Image (cartoon, grey):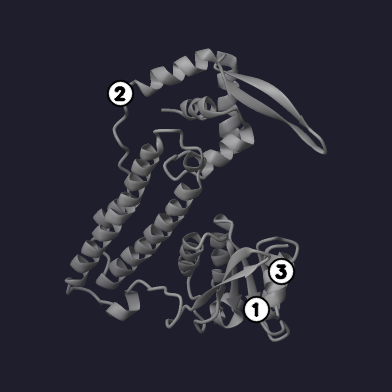
Amino acid sequence: MSINHVILGLLSREPLSGYEIKKIVQNSPFMHWSGNNNQIYKAVAELLDEGYVTKMVQHQAGAPSKNIYSITDAGQKALTNWLLTVTEAPVFKKQILVKLALAGQLKRGDLQNMLTAYADVVRMQAALSERELAQSRFAEQALSGSRKFMDLIRENVLDFYASERQWIRKAMDAVAEMTAGEAASPEAVAPKEVHGEGTDLNYRIQENRGRRFLHFTGGEAWIQREQDAIDIISLCAEHDTNAVVLDGKMLSDDFVQLRTGLAGAFLQKLGNYNIKAAVIMAGEQHLPARFREMVAEHRTGRTFRIFDNLESASDWLFA
């Protein structure tokens, strides 16, 4: 199977621009291609050469013209032939299994930390996949009689993550039974539970100009590691937003002192999922000079900014 077949399938539903094809591929959790520009436009050029698609230039007032691609009869025939070929065996590729097979020298605490970090990733990806499935072009344009297929796709994707989380619990139980090595205490390695109120990570769902954002209001020095970004990303996916406000007290010393690279790694992880973050902090003069420099550099960007009040922070999120 190649990206060419996917593009033919998308064009069999409706004419699309290269950018629209890219966004559909990127936002579909069951499509494993990166969907970058080079990949998409290379495939489209090949399909044009083969006569499987045609191109029409669409002129737009006040905006650049764009190319709209449509499938031809020959392309439809090629797509049908591919759909009827024998389907490849599912790819079985899990890095955690390779790590576990080679982790015989790790102590119990290290194994627990490894599995806990993986559990965080799985939980985050499950939430993001559910959101992407609900918002995908396929869900919006499910053809008559094919709604059941989208339901089956959703079941298949989410069952994978549910099964993986169940397996992680079994693996954690097996590791907990180990007695050799310098075992870490369960409290030190247990996955964080995130709730709306009454825990170390409190948050409120708020709105500005009719758009939703999450305001995290608790958790003294809560951000201690790069993985903590996963809790925020998961909650953003769960509540269908990509905007957050963090109270400044959540930033640990490692974050503001820039000693370990935590700030850069944490913000990069949020940026990878297009999450925009504002921090409420009363004045910057008490902050370390290097951190103030980093904040100044981000003022020209659109991903991270510090404010002294919630109103200004939320206005910037949706400016």
Residue for badge 1: 280
Residue for badge 2: 86
Residue for badge 3: 315
* Figure check: 250 above or below 177: below
Badge 1 element: strand
Question: Distance of mark 1 from mark 3, alpha carbons?
Answer: 13 Å
Of residues 160 and 253, which is closer to you in this image?
A: 160
Of residues 119 and 265, which is closer to you in this image?
A: 119
Question: Quarter-wise, where is residue 193 in the image?
Answer: bottom left
Give how far across and how far down residue 24 sits, in percent: 54, 39
User: Of the residues shown, which amino acid type is indicated by label 2?
Assistant: Val
Residue at the front extreme of this rendering: 144
Q: Nearer the viewer, mark 2 or mark 3?
A: 3
Badge 2 element: loop
Question: Distance of mark 2 from mark 1, alpha carbons?
Answer: 56 Å
Left or right placement of residue 47 versus residue 108 in this view: right
